[in-house]
Image (cartoon, rainbow, N blue to C red):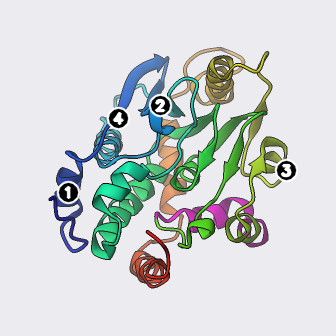
Amino acid sequence: MVKLVPTDPISVIGEKLRSLGQGTVIYKADFAPGVGLVELQQPERHNSFSGKMMAEFRDIVLALEQQSQDSDMVALVMTGSRGKSFCAGLDMVFAEEHLKGRIRSREAVNRFMYDTLTRMSRLPLITVASLAGAALGGGTELLTTFDYVCMDSTTFIRFVQTKMGVTSPWGGIHRLVDRIGRKHALRIVAGAQPIDARMAHQIGLVDKVVESSNTSKLDAYETCLAACLDLISPFVFDSKSKERVSPAAARGMKQLMARSERSTSGVIDHDMALFNSVATLAKL
C-alpha cells in the first residue's frame, strides 16, 4: 500500500502517485504554429484524474515553466479525449482504492493538485480550455486555471463539490471569484447546479460558445479545438501583416499579469484545514 503523506515534499508525493491508477496525459508541442496541446486520456472514466495522470500532468506543467526564452511557443490548448468529458475531476476508482477514509492521503493529493493548478494558472503562455464535453468537480477546478474557455453549446459545467459534502480542494474557488465575481461564484459552487453554455458565457466563465454542426461528440471535439485556435490567433500572428507576434513579448505580458495575482502563501493551509474539517462528515 502506497502511503501518501501531506508533509512530504510535493515531488515525493508525485512519485508515489505515478504508480496509482490508469489513463495518461499527452503533450504535443507542435499542435499548431506557436501552440501546444495537452490532452487528458482516460475516456472510460470521463477523463478523470488518476494518481498516474496527476503526476504526468505536473511533469508537463513543470516542463512548460522551464522552456527556454528562445522558444516560439505562445499558447497552450487543453482538451479531454475525443468523444468524452473535458474532465470529470478525481478518478473515483483511484479514490476508492487509495483515498477513501484516509484524510491525510486526501490532503496529500489535494496539496499536490493545488500546487500544480496554481503553477498551471501562472504559466507564461496564453492558455485555452477546449470543452467539447462536460467539466465536473475537480474538472471545474482545472477549468479555472485557463485564460480563456471555448465550450460546445450542448455540454455543461457543474461544481459538484458541495453535493459530495466537501469544499474546494484544489484552489479553484479563488480563481473563480477572480474570474466571475463573488456573487456568481457563490451561486454556482454552493448551489451545485449544472451550468449550460449560455449561462456560462453570460457570467464570464466561458469566452466563446461553439455551435457544432451536428450532435456528434466527435464533431464537437474538432470544432472546439478549431475555435480555440481562432481565439488564439491574434496572440500568434499580427492581424495585418500576418507575421508572427514576438513570442517572448507575448509570454512576458502573461508573466507580468501572473505576478500581479495574489500570493497563495498561507491560503493553502487554510483551504486544507477547511476541507479536512468538512470532509470528516462526508462519505469519502
Instruction: State the image coordinates of residue 275 (x, y, percent, origin top left).
Output: 46, 77
User: What's the CA distance linking mark 3 and mark 4?
Assistant: 34 Å
On the image, the x and y values in percent for residue 56 come to 30, 40
- What whole-number distance in Å separates the C-alpha atoms at marks 1 and 3? 39 Å
The amino acid on which the numbered mark 1 sits, given as a three-letter code, is: Ser
Compared to 54, does 86 lie above or below?
above
- Callout 4–callout 1 Cβ contact below 8 Å: no
Identify which amino acid the numbered label 2 is placed on: Pro
Span highlighted in magenta in the image: 170-185
Residue pictured at 50% horizontal, 56% vertical? 258
Q: Amino acid at mark 3?
A: Gln
Left or right, 192 with respect to 271, comes to right
Marked residue nearer the N-terminal end (1 or 3): 1
Main secondary structure found in the magenta portion: helix
The tag earlier along the polypeptide, 3 or 4, is 4
Indicate yes or no whether the magenta region holds residue 184. Answer: yes
Residue 11 disc label:
1
- Hey, what amino acid is under mark 4? Gly
**Label placed on residue 43:** 2
Local packing at callout 3 (Cα closer than 10 Å; few below 14, some 14-19, many 20+) is: few
Q: Residue at x 50, y 28 (%)?
A: 81
First in residue order: circle 2 vs circle 4? 4
Q: Residue 154, located in which quarter of the rendered image?
A: top right
Up/down of 50 relative to 31, above or below: below
Residue 77 placement, left or right of 50: right
Nearer the camera: disc 4 or disc 1: 4
Q: Secondary structure at mark 1?
A: helix
Q: Secondary structure at mark 2?
A: helix
How far apart are labels 3 and 2 at the CA level? 29 Å
Whole-percent x, y for residue 144 in the image: 58, 54
